Amino acid sequence: MKLKAIIATALALSFVPAAGQQRTAPPPEPKGKGTPQQQEEVVTVTTNLVQVDVVVTDKEDKPVTDLLPEDFEVFEGKKRQQITNFSFIATGGAAAGASTASSSPAGVKATAVPPAPIRPEQVRRTVAIVVDDLGLSFESVGYVQKALRKFVEEQMQPGDQVAIIRTSGDTGALQQITSDRRQLQAAIENVRWNPAGRGGLSPFQQATDQKESLGVNENSDDNPMRGIRKSQEFMDQMERERGDIYAVGTFNTLGFVINGLKELPGRKSIIFISESFRLFSSQGRNLTLMQLLRRLTDQANLASTVIYTLDASGLQDQNLNASDKVAGTGYLFDKRILTSGTVSPGAGAGPAGRPSSPQLGVQRADLGAQAEVDSVAAFRRLDALASQREQQTFESQSVLSFLAQQTGGLFARNRNDLSGGLQRMMNDQSGYYLIGYRPEQQPIDPATGQRRFHDITVKVGRPGLRVRARAGYYGLTDESGRPARRTREEQLAAALVSPFNAGGVGLRLTSLFGSEEGKGSFLRSLLHIEARDLTFSDESDGGHNAAIDLIAVNFGDNGRVIDQFSHTHTISLRGDAYQQALQNGLVFNFDFPVKEAGAYQMRVAVRDSASARVGSARQFVEVPDVSKNYLALSGLIVKGLTPSVVKTAPGDGLPAGTQAAGAVAAADDPQADPAVRRLRQGMMLDYRYAIYNAQLDPATNRPQLTTQMRLFRDGKEVFTGRVLPFDPGKQTDMKRLGAGGRLRLGSELIPGDYFLQIMVTDALTKGKNRTATQWIDFEIVN
């Protein structure tokens, strides 16, 4: 793919000409008090310091926050340790954060306000919700989706970074760690039942391999169920093996998520939503799963990651019901009598094969005895079935219980209110004690030269409290504690994986949806690079050269890589162009074709070859399906204009009859261009976009559209424009209408991050598709 690098002052965009509105925004409401920042505490295990994160709750599961160091006892093995470090880290507020939504006109669905980019020091909690769609039953998936939607809409708080990851998804799914509720809702829509996984239609599958011993030799030729049982056992064994394969895939996904969280600051958590795992079979314990479990818990403890587990199967009803079939033969028939009630040949049969009267009496006696035996057998089967269900429930939950217990998390089971289980886990993460001590034992076993496991036990002297901490840790050598040197490819990959933008090279990414006839849908990306962060070499001919490695990846909402390219580029500048680049930066632009509608995430990483500094940026984009003839909007192109360059001149391609008609859309300040969008007070904010699939009035062959713009800061609406009728002017392509407008930024607007929202409503369309909206962020600077 060909890239074009241009200086920001020369950036030119050509989506469509625009019609629009020009308004002046009033000052916003005074800014409230900021949220306290997270303390820079990190759960660590080093060669000379162990810091253990401990959660203490009362009998009602409410966090206890007023304990002192003398209230705790910490044991490594059986030896009590002296506490050298102690603090309480508050990570969440008392009340759940509700989704902030814009106020919308009647009949228009409210839309959540996109959050401002979050910085590492602002993160309070990092939570990866791993949905085991390889193991969820069809019946449970709907309940899981409902609980996740409630979590995103009501339980997330400011400062929460969340990912929703499916175990069947590709590795790019980890890119979904975000505070943007829109992106999380898109991920929830991809949580579906996987028929190829190990989950059935219902979480309450009847056991098919129960056996009862009634004193009958099951291998006897006299047992008519022998062939059926052998066939069923073979099918059960195949099903167990298939389930084991998918369980390995589930644990591999968990391991990948843990590795991704390892590099993040502070205490992290995984909420693992799944159903049953088979740890035991007719051959005994599943050693493969046991080894994977131990490896996962070791990884989690080294990465300071707590695993919470939620059994999605709900309340386990172990009672018997009408569908349980326990009737059957006790196999005590006379050998001459078959289950059909006929008599075998040569047994004194009468005419037409019917038994004679004496034989009939014998048969009735035998049948009476058989009924009594069958009744006893049925009750034995009832007892065996109830006992087996209880054992299966225990075994199916043991994996989820083990993961939580070994990493200091909670296991929520036997509850139909899944959202309540999620809320309990988030409440549990509202704060924790960080307790440190200096270990006396060597981290390496002198006999084997291998790292060894150190058991940890934490106790609290105050009665009536519950304490949860990690079960232990593996010691680190000095060598393993040092960060490994990374290759160029590893540096770029790490920058793409991280949920935070790397700041070694300053980047700003703007990805916009668009559609053109003959070209289809596409994402156009504008990448602004701070040239001051690049290393330029002075050439003998007076030029200045810098080499960069650039990689761009477009991820789908399921974490799958849709498209990507990498490019090594040499930037050569001379004279004034070099000085302007240092002052205003550089802009790269590139397009990615998009074949399917959905949610996408564009991620870009840039590495300065000389200094090895790396920068990264990302943006979430929703792409509508234009082919379905629904109302849709392109991405917004925003730039700032100073009043001195706003002139009127006819014939510039803009529709007539609008307040912005004849405006010259040229920015005189490179920082106010569409790739940067740093505007100053008093500027005109110029925005352009395209309207797709507007319905036409049969009488006039014209659309009946209205437009409205809004301005948000810190999630609060600070300006609402009037609802204005849209005039397409002389435009002829009614499927792709150019629109836009202007907003004068009042001098009272305080510097900070803002969002511009555009809403377009089609009066000729009914239902939920009558309104389309788009957002874009910009900044007001001094």
Image (spheres, rainbow, N blue to C red):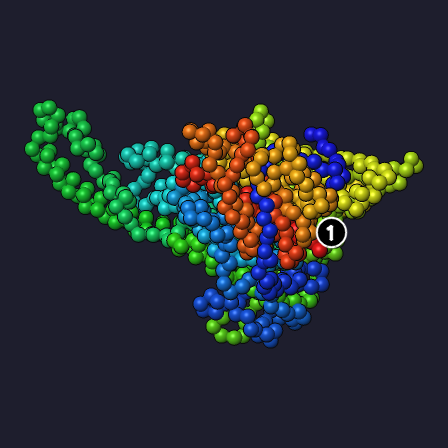
For disc 1, the marked residue is: 483
Q: Nearer the viewer, residue 246 or 720?
A: 720
Image position of 132 (left or right of 44): left
Task: Say if 34 sits above or below 516 in the image.
Answer: below
The amino acid type, in three-letter code, at marker 1 is Pro
- Number of labels in the image equals 1
Task: Say if 489 sits above or below 24 in the image.
Answer: above
Q: Nearer the viewer, residue 424 or 779?
A: 779
Badge 1: few (under 14), some or many (20 or more) residues near its Cα, within 10 Å? few
Residue at image point 51% right, 65% down: 94
Q: Position of residue 774 (x, y in %)?
A: 55, 43
Residue at image point 55% right, 70% down: 65
Q: Nearer the viewer, residue 276 or 102?
A: 102
Q: Position of residue 431 (x, y in %)?
A: 56, 64
Q: Quadrant of the N terminus?
A: top right
Q: Position of residue 28 (x, y in %)?
A: 58, 58
Residue at image point 9% right, 24% down: 351
Q: Quadrant of the C terminus?
A: bottom right
Q: Position of residue 383 (x, y in %)?
A: 30, 51
Q: Secondary structure at mark 1?
A: loop
User: Does the image show residue 648?
Assistant: yes
